[in-house]
Image (cartoon, rainbow, N blue to C red):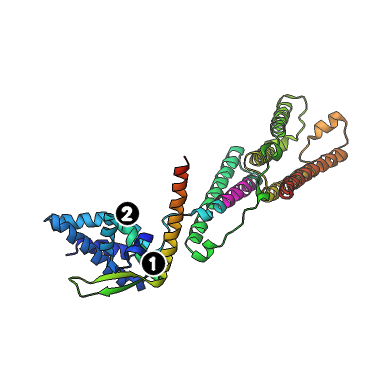
Amino acid sequence: MTTLTDRYVAEVLRGIPESQRDDIERELRSSIADAVEVRLRTDEDEEKAEVEALTALGDPARLSAEYAGRPLYLIGPGLYLSYTRLLKTLLTTAVPLVLVGASAAGFAGGGTVGQVLWDAAGTALTVAMHVAFWVTAVFAAVQRVPKARDRRLKRWVPAMLPELPAQRIDRLSLVGGTSIATVLICLLVLVQLYGPVPVISPGLWESGWLYLAVVFAAVRIGFDLVGYYLGWGVPQAVANAVMGLAFAVLGGWVTAGGLLLNDAFLTAMGWPEGVVVWVVVIAVVLMALNDSVNGFVRALRRRTA
Amino acid sequence: MLACLLILRRPGYGYALLETLESCGFTVDANTLYPLLRRLEKQGLLTAEWNTDESRPRKYYVTSPDGAALADILSRDWDELNTAFSKLRDDE
C-alpha cells in the first residue's frame, strides 16, 4: 500500500530534473521521517503524525518549484513594465487598424451595415485577445529562461517620460474635433434625407460605403483619445499614418470614380463636375497627409524633448 | 540564511536545523528551508555528506570556508544596520 508520504514525495519529484531526484527523495523522506518521529514522542497515532508532518511541509507543487528554482508567478517585476508597455503599444495600434480594415473588407464584400460593423467589431476583439494572449505567453516563457530574463529589454531614460496632458493633444482640440465631426455627420445625414437635392450620390448612400467613413471618423477620434489618455508615440503615429493612407486611397478612389457626389446636386448648383471632383480628391489627400504628418510631429517632439 | 550558516558551523541535518532555528526564535517554513539548504550547497557555501551510521541515513550539512567568510561579511552588515537603527532610536 502506498502511504501518504509516498504520494507526497512522488508529487514533489514530478517537477524536478531527473539527475537530482534520487538525492532529493532520500533527503525529503528522511526529513519527513524525522518530523513524524518527533510528533510520535507526544502522540501515539502514527497516521495523525504523518498528516501533521506533511501539512507542515505544505503544497508539494510549491516545494517542488522551490527545489527546481522555478518562479511561482507568471511575469515577475523585472519584466512586468516592458510587458505592459508592449501590450499597450500593440493594442492601441493594431486593433484600430484591424477595425478599419475589417470594415472596409466587409463593405467591399457588400454586407448590410449592421452585419459588417458587428463582424468588424468581432474581428477586432479577436485580434485584441490574440495580441493579449501571445504577448503574455511570450513574456511568461522569457521569465522562465534565465539568460533571456536577466537581459534588460530597454533601459529607462528620462526622455521616455510622457508629455503632460496639456501638451499631448489639448482638451480643446479633442472636444472641438470630436464635436465638429459629429455635427458635420448629422448635417450631412439631414441634408441627404430632408434637403431638396441630396449632396451625396444616392447609390453610394445605399451601398454602405458612407458608414465606412463613419468608422474612419470613430477610429480617428479613438486615436485622439489614446493620445490624450495613454500618450502618443512613434508606433501610434505609424498606425495613424497607415489609416490616413487607407482613407486617402479609398476616399480619393470613390470621389475620382464619380461615385461620391450626386450628379443632380452638381447640376442644380451649376458646378462643373471635373473641377469639383479634383478639388474634393485633393482635399481628402491633403487632410490625410496633414493628419499623418501631425501624428509624427507629435511623436517626435516628445522624443527630442 | 545567515542563521543557517552560523548554526551549521557544526554539522547538522535538515529537520534538526529547523528545530534549532525555531528554538532560537526564527520562524522559517520547512518548505523554504530544505530547498535553501540545497541552493547553498550548490553555491559552495555549505558542504554536504550522507551519514548512514544512525538509525536512518541523513544528509549532514556543514558551513564551508566560503560560507564562513560570507557569514562574517553578513554579520558585519547586520551589526552596522543595527548600530544605525540604535543611533536613530537614541537621537529621539
Question: Is residue A61 among what the camera can see?
Answer: no
> Which amino acid type is shown beneath numbered disc 2?
Phe
Residue A67 appears at what percent x and percent y? 36, 64
Mark 2 lies on residue: B26
Magenta stretch secondary structure, dominant:
helix
Residue A31 appears at what percent x and percent y? 25, 64
Residue B23 lies left or right of residue A92; in this view the side is: left
Residue A4 appears at what percent x and percent y? 21, 60
The chain containing the residue under callout 1 comes to: B
Mark 1 lies on residue: B40
- Label 2 SS: loop
Look at the picture and state if A176 lies above or below A100: above
Residue B37 appears at what percent x and percent y? 35, 65
Tell me the magenta residue range.
Answer: A84-98
- Label 1 SS: helix
For marks 2 and 1, the one nearer the N-term is 2
Q: Of residues A300 and B53, which is closer to you in this image?
A: B53
Look at the picture and state if A162 lies above or below A61: above
Q: Of residues B20 and A158, which is closer to you in this image?
A: B20
Whether label 2 touches label 1, CB < 8 Å: no
> Which amino acid type is shown beneath numbered disc 1?
Leu
Q: Of residues A120 and B25, which is closer to you in this image?
A: B25
Locate residue A172: give its quadrant. top right
